[in-house]
Image (spheres, rainbow, N blue to C red):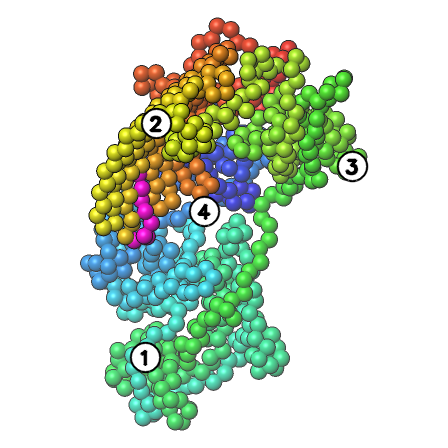
Amino acid sequence: MWVNGEPVTIDTSNTSYSQGFPVNEYRIGSNRNHMWVRFYDGTQTTADSFLVNEVSNSARPYQSTRVGRGVAYAVVTSQVNDELFTSLPQFKFTVQGARLYDPSRDTTVGGTGTQRWNDPATWGGDGDDLPAVQIYNLLRGFSYSGTWLYGLQSTSAARLPATEWIAQINKCRLVVDGPGQGPQYMTGGELLVSTELGTATEALLTGCQGRLAEIGGLYKLHVGEPGASVFSFSDGDIISTEEQSFSPFFGLADTINGISATYVEPAEAWNVKAAPSLYRPDYEAEDGNRRLMADVKMDMVYRSQQVQRLMKSALLEARRARRHTLVLPPSAWQLEPGDVIDWTSPRNGYVTKLFRVDGVTDKANLDVMVDITEIDPSDYDWNPATDYTPPTFGPTGPMRPPPQVLTGFGAFPHIVYDDNGIPRRPAILLTWPWDAEEDVDIIGVEFEIRRQSTQVVEYRDRTDEPTAGQVILAPFSLVQVTTYEVRARFIPRSARPMAWSGWIPVTTDDVKLAPNLDFDPYQGLVGFDQLEQDLAKYQDFMGGSVRELIRQVQNLNQWVTDQGWGNEYQFGEIRKQLTATFNNARAEWKLDVNVVAAQNFALSQRVEQLDAEVFDPVTGLPAVAGAVDILRVEVNGLDGEIEAVSQSLSQLTTEVNGIASSVTIRGEAGSSPGGGWSRYGVQVKTGSGSTWSSAAFYLDTNGSLSRAVFEADQFIVVAGGNLNNPFVIDGTAVRMNVANIGTVTAGLIRGASNNLQVQLNNDRILIIDGT
């Protein structure tokens, strides 16, 4: 479909409009459509409902009886818009056209396929675009509902020999390489039923360099390059007693040495276009330095490569002037117009020279008079690299001014200070160039801000003072130390189009909320300021200090020796061990129980350990699995103050090819004259090298503050397996689908589109135009 000389695309996926499918090129913004189209292919059984129910009125009624059976038509609806239309739009439609019968696709007549002449429902295919198929259907005649419409009438299939026609159809179908690769000959066009059949046929023959011959009531077609010779003769075969004629040259009026042509060009709205003219300086020199041009109208050809192939072969063939009229014996009775023959003639210097039979006259004595013209198949040789000249195309559609782009636009991090010089808000400074003479039509600048990580626009605004050249944006939704992207465009006084600038990244400064000045959801939370240090202690409790506890347990004997107690202590020990090995595998169990008692000191510990190890026969690396369980109790008054500590540790570990995983559960309880404490932690961990993933929770109390801390990428609470309303914390927000809350204390409440903001801390409601 073309509108005002411009090709358009149709959004056939959008069926929401009663007017039809929207035309994309006549849409302003994302959904403001101004043109719609509906198509009917002639098989419809009811009238167009939109015309009947919406457009029809008493002054101009459109009745439900206007079905248009057998008529293909389109209904186009346009909405007035000064930017898009200056007058009523003009339309042009590219259609496939009639479904034709192709004998080469009919198995019953020697072709291959399911088409049948007596069943039009089987017609149609790639042959619809081939000139040989089109001429065949013209000669058989077109009918509608059993009534003759156009072409010859009552022509039987016997008058168009299927074998000859199938050969020429397949010749049209041969694929040609180069630009516009496809069948060798394709034609198409619109024929009025008032067009003379001869005129229509000649236009199609021009598109395939074809010749149509009527031979004793039979119609035979020859297209393009001449075929193989069907008859050979020499000078001795010519009836010398009969008259002969020979034309070695054309007269000046019939001589051509160049060719120009016009054709229909789809890229220029299917208008007539002149092909690059073909000149031959060598031929011009032969013709006395004259330029003798032939002008050919190829009204049914719409491919530039095909046009240039036809021009080249036509010019070369037109230079072959040798024509003979002579009489041959009865053995030449088989010859027909269009046949190719070869002649060996020492008298003329011919050696199996090819000629085309242009006319045949059967004499009473069975001799045959023939008119022949020299031919050469090389005239049809084609080399796209050297013979093809790509056409140049000019604009065909409306010349709309291109959208103006805001160039030189900049975005920079900025800080908003209060009257006391205290940083209060992260902001973004926008700048743009301004030229009072060039930008006289500009009345404003509009902006959009989106978060780089989500690509979701969070803020839209505009300024009506474009002459300032800058503006500071400090919406409450901006988050410190976050990368945003900003774009802008001018707002014109007229309706001319404007284009957005590119997205410019900018990272906001680290401006935190000020206590007692801004809303801080963590203000007053006991111990919150120490959370970072406490979390580090919890992580060490489940990490580094676990390894220290294992080291202490394993080195108890050395520790006791280092105390220098001499004989002033008691030490008891139980050790058990089982080991099994086989080839590359080993399994082991150990149990160690130790008790120590000395002045002001008592300790008891139990360590049970399981290990399994198999060396991988492929990599040679060990795959290990281990489990350790430690119980340790200790009362220590060696430093003058008694402290009691009980500890437990259970740990599972595995490692294969450098991939390690672990589960650690540790508890500790302690008491002293200064107070008590207890701590419990669970950690799961997996990874390798520097890449690890872990989750943990910690329970901790020191007598004055108790705390439960969960550390994970996601914390999720599900009630009774109901996944519709989970409670989720993912490090960026607390997420709930449904919340019943009695009292809410907040700084900002905003919608998902960010167009509605309730800024409680600033005592204002902000509504942003999202268009």
Using the image, determine if residue 235 lies above or below residue 540: below
Three-letter amino acid code of the residue under disc 2? Phe
Identify the disc placed on residue 435: 3
Mark 2 and mark 4: Cα distance apart in space: 103 Å
Mark 1 and mark 4: Cα distance apart in space: 42 Å
Front label number (2 vs 3): 2
Task: Estimate the x, y position of residue 449 in percent, counting from the top left.
Answer: 61, 29
Disc 2 or 3, which lies upstream in sequence?
3
Say if the magenta span includes residue 619.
yes
- Reading the image, the residue beneath label 2 is 571
Q: Is residue 174 visible?
A: yes
Asked if the residue under mark 4 is in contact with the one under mark 2, i.e. CB atoms within 8 Å, the reply is: no
Task: Estimate the x, y position of residue 81 in percent, counting from the top left.
Answer: 59, 31
Give the magenta part as a residue range: 618-625
Task: Categorize mark 1 by other alpha carbons within 10 Å: few (<14), some (14-19), many (20+).
Answer: some
Disc 2 or 4, which lies upstream in sequence?
4
- Position of 357 with respect to 162 (left or right) is right
Asked if the residue under mark 4 is in contact with the one under mark 1, i.e. CB atoms within 8 Å, the reply is: no
Three-letter amino acid code of the residue under disc 3? Asp
- Reading the image, the residue beneath label 1 is 229
Three-letter amino acid code of the residue under disc 1? Ser
Disc 1 or 4, which lies upstream in sequence?
4
Using the image, determine if residue 169 lies above or below residue 635: below
- Position of 420 with respect to 11 (left or right) is right
Mark 4 and mark 3: Cα distance apart in space: 47 Å
Mark 3 and mark 1: Cα distance apart in space: 79 Å
Observer-nearest residue: 341 or 469? Answer: 469
Secondary structure at numbered mark 1: loop
- Reading the image, the residue beneath label 4 is 94
- Position of 391 with respect to 137 (left or right) is right
Asked if the residue under mark 1 is in contact with the one under mark 3, i.e. CB atoms within 8 Å, the reply is: no
